[in-house]
Image (cartoon, rainbow, N blue to C red):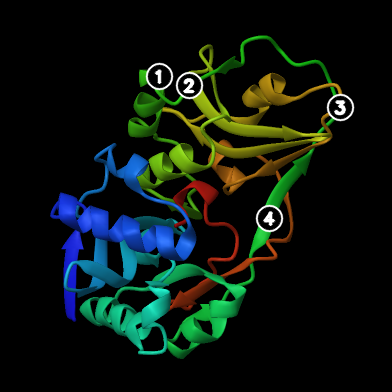
Amino acid sequence: MELIRVNGKTTTARFNRALNGLMEEVFGFSLARFQALGVWDEQYEYFSVMDESKMVANCGAYHMQMVVDGIKQEFLQFGAVAVHPAYRGKGLGRLVMEQALGEYPDVPAFLYANLDAKPFYAKLGFVPQEERQPFVTVKPGPRKPGLERLELIYPEVGEYLASRACFSPRLDCIDQYALNWFHLVYQFQDNLYHVPELGVMLVMEERGSEVFLHDVAAPQKVAFEHLLPYIQGEGVERVTFGFRPDRLDSRWETEPSSDPDSVLMARGWEGDLGCFIPRLVRT
């Protein structure tokens, strides 16, 4: 078996086939649609174990430029470790994680761990963080015309993502273009809108009396008070944010995050990441 390291620019078709084979085996999906976009670059690294032509273990590490309390800080974000079922119990998951962490001993890291994997990551020095979900209550009212649907293939989508200039000064990711595309391709392709009058794209879902505003991308600052008329409705009583709402100069409340399947864990960082890493930058 061989331990290899590549990044988004140095992957090959052979590597991608092997990676997708492992992903299908472990997680039940392939990255082929996302790979076809060609947006991964040197920021994303793979640490993998190959058994001849078959990939049997992998972890991915994304180099992120974050803003934390007004200060730029590099972080590593790890995706879920994948180990082929036939090769489990051999320490390969720990091997690829230790290889990645060893390359960047002074760079803080975080990840979202499945609850059953929490003890594994704890042994590597990751500590659980308490997340708090931001939201705001709103008064029901008629929606202002001007909210338009976008399709994933429309050029405006990439233009909005590439020109993003609206960030939270307390906790946000500056270089999130590729990560945004991942979420749009696999999770939110049917939830894209824009308001041409404001020059802003929204990733948004409506569920009963609640609007989930997962993301707002614009080349300029957008105030929530200007955005609200386009997303409110006669039955809407709450807007739940997928990012820190100070990105929109909004007031907000928080409550404990209710994700029953995963937990935010951090390593090498003494600050507070719990409120709130944007949903569209999580791997």
Residue under the image location 44 percent in, 86 percent down: 125
Between disc 3 and disc 4, the foreground one is: 3
- Give the structural element (helix, strand or loop) at label 1: loop
**Disc 4: CA contacts within 10 A as few (<14), some (14-19) or many (>=20):** many
How far apart are the two marked residues, 2 and 1, measured between alpha carbons? Answer: 5 Å
How far apart are the two marked residues, 3 and 4, measured between alpha carbons? Answer: 22 Å
Task: From the image, tell me which residue sits under label 1.
Answer: 154
Task: From the image, tell me which residue sits under label 3.
Answer: 235
Q: Is label 2 in contact with label 1 (beta carbons under 8 Å)?
A: yes
Q: Residue 268: tell me if it is visible.
A: no
Residue under the image location 73 percent in, 61 percent down: 258
Residue 57 x, y percent position in the rendering: 32, 73
Residue under the image location 57 percent in, 57 percent down: 276
Quarter in which the C terminus is drawn: bottom left
First-in-chain label (4 vs 2): 4
- Give the structural element (helix, strand or loop) at label 3: loop
**Disc 3: CA contacts within 10 A as few (<14), some (14-19) or many (>=20):** few
Q: Which amino acid does the dot numbered 1 rest on? A: Tyr
First-in-chain label (1 vs 3): 1
Q: In this rendering, would 174 be left or right of 147?
A: left
Task: From the image, tell me which residue sits under label 4.
Answer: 133
Q: In this rendering, would 208 be left or right of 1?
A: right
202 or 259: which is nearer to us?
259
Q: Is label 4 in contact with label 2 (beta carbons under 8 Å)?
A: no
Q: Which amino acid does the dot numbered 3 rest on? A: Gly
170 or 210: which is nearer to us?
210
Between disc 2 and disc 3, the foreground one is: 2
Q: Which amino acid does the dot numbered 2 rest on? A: Glu
Task: From the image, tell me which residue sits under label 2.
Answer: 151
Quarter-of-image position of residue 256: bottom right
- Give the structural element (helix, strand or loop) at label 4: strand
